[in-house]
Every structure is written in structure tokens, then in C-alpha cells.
């Protein structure tokens, strides 16, 4: 796992623009929620977590930023087991065939607000790719106080039509339109990889000591 992760980080750094800092999306602090209408009586939600991805970003040159994200559908949960089974079934996300959703940015635009961007990219769900625009708010660019790593954090809402991705079952009783909200933290990739390596070494040392 560590070897695969280190290779992924090295590949991201090799292809990153020279001006940019490459960040690894921190899976413990990156998640999203999806919200829809059920007969207009209630508005259930589901949450996805353990998101993986990289972000190339320089706050002085936001339009040249880029992001690549992979969302493991297996981690999508509503907290209701029967509904989760339905969501993972062939009627909806068809987890067996399409285990991941992905997003690759294609354009980043500045707005009148210094901390807000419009990020357009290709979202692929269930093997279907559609353009999606996220209204991104940059929460903070700085250094984490505990790990002392350069980091960036942002929130990003969007509105999608699920039928466009082959997920239109029960429309209109269950709304076609869903709202998506992502919150994420990216840690500088080299420092993050070093931390993961150190954590793995510490775990291995503890496991070895426990066997003695």
C-alpha cells in the first residue's frame, strides 16, 4: 500500500506544473454529501468518504490550477442499510461494474471574490462522463499547526441531474436534481507521503514489539 501510494505521489509531482504546489487530498478530512427530495416530504442525504486525489495549486495563479479526484462508491452511505444496498445495486451506481466515480478539472476561473473560483471538469459516474461546474470557496491556504505541513482547504457545492448519469430511477417521485457539497483538505504531497511512511514504520514497530 505504501509503495503504491509513494508511486502515485511521485507520478503526480513529475507531471505537476513547475509553478504549482502539489497537494494530496487528505482522506480523513475530505468528504462529500449528496441531498435529494423524496416526494417533497423529506430531503435525505448520503455521504461519501475516503476520497483520493491531487491538486496542483498556486494562490497567485488560480486559473492554472488542476485537480484529479477518485471517489470510491463503496464508501457511499446514507446510514440506512436497505437504501445503501439499493444505491450500490445495478439499479443505481452498479458498484460491481463501476466501483469509482472520478472528476478531472478542465477549466478554473476566478470570480469577483478573491477566495472563490469556478472549477469546471469532467465527472464520470457509472461509466458516463458529463461536464460539471463547482463553485469553490477557498477556506484557507497555510500550514497545519500539528503536522507543520503546507495545506489548502476548500468547500465546493454543485447541482447535478442524476438521470444524466444513468441514475434516474423513480424520477419524479425522487427528484432528478440533487445537490452535492464537498469539503476537502489537501496536504503538500511530499510532506504527506513522508508522514504516511513514518506512520507505517511506527505501526510496524509497535506490531513487532507486541509479538515479543
Image: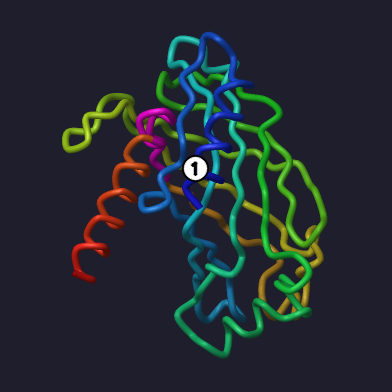
25 vs 60: above or below: below
Front in this rendered view, residue 95 or 118: 95
Residue that lies at the very extreme toward the bottom in this rendered image: 82
Which residue is pictured at 53% across the width and 34% down the height? 9
128 vs 191: above or below: below
Figure colour scheme: rainbow
Residue that lies at the very extreme toward the front in this rendered image: 212
Find the magenta span and give its range. Answer: 184-193
Which residue is pictured at 59% across the width and 44% down the height? 69
Q: Which residue is mark 1?
A: 156
Residue 114 location, x and y as percent? Answer: 41, 18
Instruction: Tell me the quarter of the picture where residue 128 sits.
Output: bottom right
69 vs 174: above or below: above
- For the question of whether residue 153 can be seen, the reply is no
Report whether 127 appears left or right of 106. Answer: right
Q: Residues within 10 Å of mark 1 (few under 14, many from 20)?
A: many
Report whether 176 appears left or right of 42. Answer: right
Residue 76 location, x and y as percent? Answer: 54, 69
Which residue is pictured at 25% across the width and 51% down the height? 202
Residue 171 location, x and y as percent? Answer: 75, 75
Amino acid at each position: 500500500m505504501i509503495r503504491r501510494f509513494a508511486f502515485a505521489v511521485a507520478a503526480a509531482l513529475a507531471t505537476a506544473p513547475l509553478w504549482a504546489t502539489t497537494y494530496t487530498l487528505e482522506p480523513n478530512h475530505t468528504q462529500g454529501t449528496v441531498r435529494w427530495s423524496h416526494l417533497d416530504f423529506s430531503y435525505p442525504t448520503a455521504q461519501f468518504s475516503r476520497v483520493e486525489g491531487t491538486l496542483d495549486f498556486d494562490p497567485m495563479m488560480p486559473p492554472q490550477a488542476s485537480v484529479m479526484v477518485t471517489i470510491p462508491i463503496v464508501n457511499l452511505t446514507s446510514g440506512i442499510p436497505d437504501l445503501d444496498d439499493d444505491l450500490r445495486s445495478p439499479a443505481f451506481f452498479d458498484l460491481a461494474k463501476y466501483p469509482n466515480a472520478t472528476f478531472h478539472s478542465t477549466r478554473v476561473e476566478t470570480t469577483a471574490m478573491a477566495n472563490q473560483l469556478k472549477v469546471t471538469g469532467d465527472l464520470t459516474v457509472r461509466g458516463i462522463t458529463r461536464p460539471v461546474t463547482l463553485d469553490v470557496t477557498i477556506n484557507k491556504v497555510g500550514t497545519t499547526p500539528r503536522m507543520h505541513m503546507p495545506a489548502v482547504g476548500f468547500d465546493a457545492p454543485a447541482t447535478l441531474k442524476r438521470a444524466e448519469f444513468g441514475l434516474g430511477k423513480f424520477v419524479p417521485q425522487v427528484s432528478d436534481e440533487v445537490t452535492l457539497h464537498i469539503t476537502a483538505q489537501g496536504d503538500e504531497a511530499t510532506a504527506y507521503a513522508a508522514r504516511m511512511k513514518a506512520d507505517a514504520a511506527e505501526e510496524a514497530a509497535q506490531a513487532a514489539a507486541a509479538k515479543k
